[in-house]
Structures are given as C-alpha cells and as structure tokens.
Image (cartoon, rainbow, N blue to C red):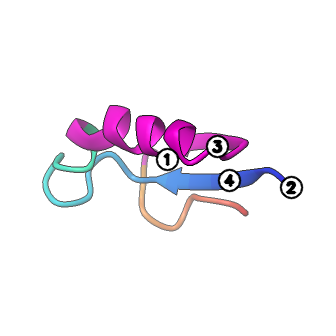
Amino acid sequence: MKAKIILNPYANRWGAKKRIETVEQACRTAGLDFDLELIPKPKQGTA
C-alpha cells in the first residue's frame, strides 16, 4: 500500500519547505512506498 503525504510548503512560515528532504529520507529509512504532493494553497490537497 502506497502512502500519500500532502505537504503545504508555506506551513510554519516556509518551515515545512525546509523539512521536505527530512520527510522523504525518514520515509525511505522506514521502508515506506510513498508519494509526496506539495500543495500551493491551504485546502488544495487531495487524498
């Protein structure tokens, strides 16, 4: 089963954007099959 991670890069005043690589690495380390979707505005993410 593939996980979908929806991330708003502006969250925490761009703080989330700085953590994208950390999130991706943590998922890989955990052996997760995942897609990472960046959304430009709040409430635009889809699951």
Q: On the rendered image, what quadrant is the N terminus found in? A: bottom right
Looking at the rendered structure, the kind of residue marked 4 is Lys
Q: Residue at x 56, y 48 (%)?
A: 30
For the residues bearing labels 4 and 1, Cβ distance under 8 angstroms = no
Q: Which residue is mark 1?
A: 39
Q: Residues within 10 Å of mark 4 (few under 14, many from 20)?
A: few
Looking at the rendered structure, the kind of residue marked 1 is Ile
Q: For marks 3 and 1, give the one nearer the viewer.
A: 3
Q: Which of the pair 31/41 is nearer the observer? A: 31
Looking at the rendered structure, the kind of residue marked 3 is Gly
Position of residue 39 in the picture relative to residue 10 (left or right): right
Q: Is residue 38 visible?
A: no
Magenta run includes residue 31: yes
Determine which quarter of the picture holds residue 21. top left
For the residues bearing labels 4 and 2, Cβ distance under 8 angstroms = no
Looking at the rendered structure, the kind of residue marked 2 is Met
Position of residue 44 in the picture relative to residue 23 (left or right): right
Q: Earlier in the sequence, mark 4 or mark 1?
A: 4
Image x and y of residue 19, in percent? 27, 42
Tell me the distance, in whole angstroms, between the alpha carbons under discs 4 and 3: 14 Å
- Magenta range is 18-40
Tell me the distance, in whole angstroms, between the alpha carbons under discs 2 and 1: 22 Å
Q: Which of the pair 28/2 is nearer the observer? A: 28
Q: Earlier in the sequence, mark 4 or mark 3?
A: 4
Magenta run includes residue 35: yes
Tell me, for residue 1, which label it has, or none: 2
Query: Does 18 sit above or below residue 10?
Result: above
Q: Earlier in the sequence, mark 2 or mark 3?
A: 2
Q: Residues within 10 Å of mark 1 (few under 14, many from 20)?
A: some
Query: Does 3 sit above or below residue 27?
Result: below
